[in-house]
């Protein structure tokens, strides 16, 4: 079923009752995507639009973003060689009426054929790449939609280059070669294509086929990886109890990193040699678990504004901390339950997030809900000030969902967990075709905890309070140890990067000696007390200083050299760990084992 988003509702105000009911006939839409000269990076699109109610001025529009990646990306900028004809081949005049709208004078034609090329030379999970090796494309970055027709079904025919194979989550059209059908534009835009000479394997889980394809060479073991993916699938299905797709496709491109979730597929990118050693392989499995879990959390369990989508504007939600944060949390949950990592590894992934969060002054500036809402202008556009005014809804979202899970387990005596929150959202919202709100998430969590969580949500979700970790972790017999030594050592407080010979300040967290005494991000440090600067040297040199000592930094700021004297501060080094409380009670031991499948030690 289709639901309008707020933005779409505003654009199409409801008319007063009309005397005669006009039957709306949807257009018939067929795309043909060709790639006759892959080395030019041009994907060739033909869009055939057949419509009994063709308007005088037909408007074709390119989406400006891809769901799952919350940034306006202006895909229209890659469109070139646009033309329009009627069915008999007569040229139709057209004009651009906005950055992403092509308006065609149809002159009474009931069928129009638009042709255009899209420059495709950017391999990310939300863009397009075509070269002499393969094609990977996202339909939201490639195929135009007719204005106001997002509910319409369409067919995509692909003409591969040479003997290339095709993989996509879209179902095939019976009796046709390389033709696929999308029931509406949300499904079309949700279904990326890989076309190339990829290697592949399949496995069935509960009679549902899962296809795994790898494009490119690398140090992976296809069969072992597919077996481990199957274990992840099993744990996801275990939580929700059913498999809401007919088949599922894992696309892995062996360059870069990252992933994007879809209803019955995922596009992943990973370094070709990133499958060894074991620790890196586990990071890959984390990515798999993340994108796979999304098929429930965000693709079906949908935050208020996320689906059906408005493809021309930002879609605002305060819930990315759940959509992304809870999904990130379930990476280690699934891997741990699948036996791919142990309880200690699951906890240590939280420790590094907590350590990083506690080093960010931005945690007092931005709440999880605000970070979610502002994703469009901040998360994908971080700058050197991000450390001071932002937090990541992924990282803090993972920490807070972890704590929420622990709190629900503790207060329900182990009867309930975050799994129950997810299951409830799936059964009572997705299955009833509703999106959920921030209030729903709190209410459902409270239902499972059997108590008010208003304090938790107002401090850690809507607010910017320092998190009291131990108050929650103690519930399952754990505590956060900061490992702080009594002795303070000298510190500067700037974050640095060494690139070749060049030592540069990347960011300056607030309230540090570097911040207070005028070192800036992008300053290039050339000398420290007259000695040639390097990251290793600076570390050793400062290690021998005491709090209160003065150090002269010679830096290039823009193109001018200057000396800046800094009085070093003092700080006890902190090395966080999550460890067992002393003398845990039987209840703490029981809850820990129930949660992490091992004895509390
Ligand atoms: Zn995600």
Image (cartoon, grey):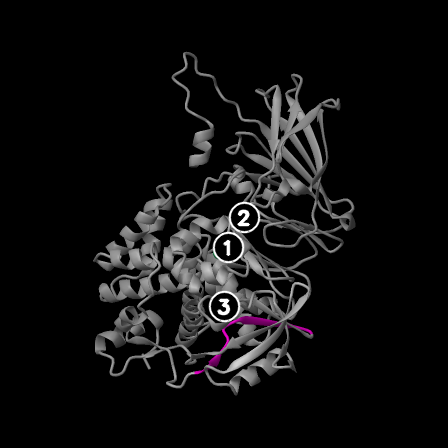
Cα–Cα span, label 2 and label 1: 9 Å
Q: Is residue 528 left or right of residue 437?
A: right
- Tell whether position 526 is magenta: no
Quarter-of-image position of residue 398: bottom left
Numbered disc 2: secondary structure: loop
Q: Which is more N-terminal, label 1 or label 3? A: 1
Magenta range is 489-500
**Placement of the C terminus among the 4 image quadrants:** bottom left
Which residue sits at x=60%, y=74%? Answer: 276
Q: Residues within 10 Å of mark 2 (few under 14, many from 20)?
A: many
Cα–Cα span, label 3 and label 1: 23 Å
* Residue 87 place in picture, x, y as percent: 70, 23
Quarter-of-image position of residue 249: bottom right
Which residue sits at x=54%, y=34%? Answer: 153
* Residue 163 place in picture, x, y as percent: 74, 51
**Placement of the N terminus among the 4 image quadrants:** top left
Disc ID at residue 71:
2
Vertical position of residue 564 compared to residue 287: above or below: below
Q: Is residue 451 left or right of residue 552?
A: left
Disc ID at residue 379:
1
- Circles 2 and 1, Cβ within 8 Å, touching? The answer is yes
Q: Considering depth in this image, is 430 or 503 the residue closer to the camera? A: 503
Residue pointed to by mark 3: 515
Whether residue 296 is visible to the viewer of this picture, yes or no, is: no
Q: Nearer the viewer, mark 3 or mark 1?
A: 3
Q: CB of residue at label 2: within 8 Å of ligand 1?
A: no
Numbered disc 3: secondary structure: helix
Which residue sits at x=59%, y=62%? Answer: 257
Q: Considering depth in this image, is 87 or 323 the residue closer to the camera? A: 323
- Tell whether position 490 is magenta: yes
């Amino acid at each position: 079923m289709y639901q309008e988003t707020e933005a779409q509702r505003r654009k199409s105000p409801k008319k007063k009752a009309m005397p005669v009911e006009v039957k709306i006939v949807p257009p018939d839409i067929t795309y043909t995507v060709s790639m006759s000269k892959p080395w030019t990076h041009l994907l060739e699109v033909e869009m055939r639009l057949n419509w009994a109610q063709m308007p005088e001025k037909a408007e074709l529009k390119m989406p400006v973003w891809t769901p799952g990646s919350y940034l306006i990306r202006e895909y229209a900028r890659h469109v070139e060689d646009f033309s329009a004809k009627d069915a008999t081949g007569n040229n139709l005049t057209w004009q651009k009426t906005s950055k992403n709208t092509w308006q065609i004078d149809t002159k009474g034609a009931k069928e129009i054929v638009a042709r255009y090329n899209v420059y495709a030379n950017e391999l990310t999970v939300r863009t397009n790449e075509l070269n002499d090796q393969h094609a990977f494309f996202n339909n939201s970055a490639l195929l135009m939609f007719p204005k106001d027709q997002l509910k319409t079904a369409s067919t995509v025919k692909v003409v591969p280059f040479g003997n290339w194979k095709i993989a996509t989550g879209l179902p095939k059209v019976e009796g046709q070669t390389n033709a696929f059908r999308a029931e509406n534009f949300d499904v079309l835009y949700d279904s990326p294509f890989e076309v190339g000479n990829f290697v592949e394997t399949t496995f069935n889980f509960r009679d549902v086929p899962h296809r795994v394809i790898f494009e490119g060479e690398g140090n992976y073991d296809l069969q072992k990886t597919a077996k481990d993916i199957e274990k992840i699938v099993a744990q996801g299905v275990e939580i929700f109890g059913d498999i809401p797709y007919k088949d599922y496709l894992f696309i892995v491109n062996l360059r870069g990193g990252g992933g994007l979730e879809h209803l019955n597929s995922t596009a992943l990118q990973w370094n070709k040699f990133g499958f060894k050693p074991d620790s890196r392989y586990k990071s890959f499995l984390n990515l798999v678990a993340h994108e796979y879990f999304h098929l429930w959390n965000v693709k079906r369990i949908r935050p208020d504004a996320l689906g059906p989508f408005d493809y021309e504007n930002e879609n605002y939600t305060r819930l990315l901390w759940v959509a992304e944060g809870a999904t990130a949390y379930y990476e280690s949950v699934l891997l741990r339950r699948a036996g791919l990592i142990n309880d200690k590894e699951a906890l240590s992934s939280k420790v590094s997030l907590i350590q990083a969060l506690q080093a960010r002054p931005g945690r007092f500036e931005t709440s999880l809900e605000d970070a979610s809402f502002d994703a469009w202008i901040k998360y994908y556009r971080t700058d050197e000030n991000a450390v001071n005014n932002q937090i990541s809804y992924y990282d803090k979202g993972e920490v807070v969902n972890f704590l929420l899970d622990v709190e629900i387990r503790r207060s329900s005596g182990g009867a309930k967990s975050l799994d129950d929150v997810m299951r409830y959202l799936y059964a009572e919202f997705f299955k009833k075709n509703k999106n959920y709100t921030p209030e729903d998430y709190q209410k459902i969590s409270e239902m499972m905890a059997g108590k008010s969580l208003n304090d938790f949500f107002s401090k850690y979700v809507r607010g910017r309070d320092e998190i009291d970790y131990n108050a929650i972790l103690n519930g399952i017999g754990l505590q956060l140890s900061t490992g702080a030594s009594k002795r303070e050592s000298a510190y500067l407080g700037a974050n640095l990067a060494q690139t070749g010979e060049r030592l540069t300040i990347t960011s300056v967290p607030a309230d540090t000696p570097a911040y207070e005494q005028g070192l800036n991000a992008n300053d290039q440090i050339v000398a420290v007390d007259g000695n040639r600067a390097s990251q290793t040297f600076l570390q050793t040199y400062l290690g021998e200083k005491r709090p209160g000592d003065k150090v002269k930094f010679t830096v290039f700021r823009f193109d001018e050299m200057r000396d800046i004297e800094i009085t070093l501060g003092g700080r006890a080094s902190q090395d966080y760990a999550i460890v067992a409380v002393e003398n845990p009670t039987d209840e703490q031991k029981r809850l820990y084992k129930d949660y992490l499948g091992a004895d509390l030690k």
